[in-house]
Image (cartoon, rainbow, N blue to C red):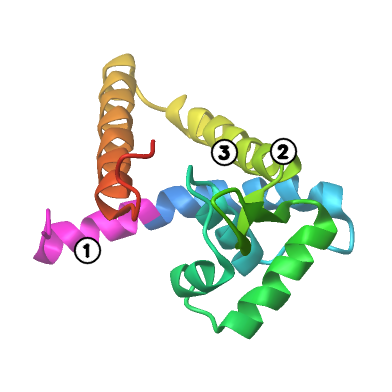
Amino acid sequence: MDPVDGAERDRLADDIGDLRRALIPGLLLHLLSGFEDDEPSMIQIATLYTLDVPAPPTLRELAGRVSRSVSATSRLVDQLVRRGLADRREDPGDRRVRRITLTPAGADFLRTFERVRADAQLEVMAYLTAEERELVIRATALLGEASRRRAHARSPHPDVR
């Protein structure tokens, strides 16, 4: 399903690009400032988001979700485990299976990332009229709901929320 096409799609891409250019540099610099010389990579951050699900994946499942080989994903998980952001846990239903989970520090990292991003977006929204802000707030809520529906539809465990 393509909600927009042609010139409208190009304009939307330009507008999203302008917004991201306004947000991302400060967001990333703020977020990574606490890591000094050992900042997480983009693939590590994307992997943390991939792990932020109710049903933790196995290493093989995670490899498929991040489009990496099992061995590359294993090294990636090792890095996240060393940072204290992820952990390997025994599956309660099958002791032979290990699941990759976010640690509380990993979840905190993602929530901080989201809070800093939201604060940056609110700074940009200060340049909108009250009516425009209400429209953006409503549109953001709708996008959040659509994202939850999409995640639920794609979930290998749709009954788990």
Return the x and y of residue 52 as percentages of the image width and height. Answer: 54, 47
Estimate how packed mark 1 is, as few (under 14), some (14 to 19) or many (20 or more) residues with alpha carbons within 10 Å: few
Observer-nearest of 124 and 118: 118
Return the x and y of residue 156 as percentages of the image width and height. Answer: 34, 55
* Residue that badge 1 annotates: 10
| Amino acid under disc 2 | Pro
Single out the residue that lies furthest toward the top.
130
Question: Which quadrant, please, contains the C terminus?
Answer: top left
Horizontal side, residue 117 vs residue 64: left or right = right
Quarter where residue 107 is shown: top right
Q: Residue at horizontal 64%, vertical 84%?
A: 71
Q: Residue at horizontal 53%, vertical 52%?
A: 56
* Local SS, label 3: helix
Q: Does the magenta stretch include residue 12?
A: yes
Horizontal side, residue 26 vs residue 121: left or right = right
* Local SS, label 2: helix
- Can you tell which mark lies on residue 114? 3
Horizontal side, residue 111 vs residue 29: left or right = left
Horizontal side, residue 79 vs residue 18: left or right = right
Is label 3 or label 1 in front? 3
Prevailing SS of the magenta stretch: helix
Q: Residue at horizontal 65%, vertical 64%?
A: 44
Is label 2 or label 1 in front? 2
Estimate how packed mark 2 is, as few (under 14), some (14 to 19) or many (20 or more) residues with alpha carbons within 10 Å: few
- Can you tell which mark lies on residue 104? 2
- In 3D space, how far apart are the residues under numbered discs 3 and 1 (Cα atoms)? 27 Å
Q: Give the range drawn in magenta.
A: 1-16
Estimate how packed mark 3 is, as few (under 14), some (14 to 19) or many (20 or more) residues with alpha carbons within 10 Å: some
Return the x and y of residue 159 as percentages of the image width and height. Answer: 31, 40
Quarter where residue 4 is shown: bottom left
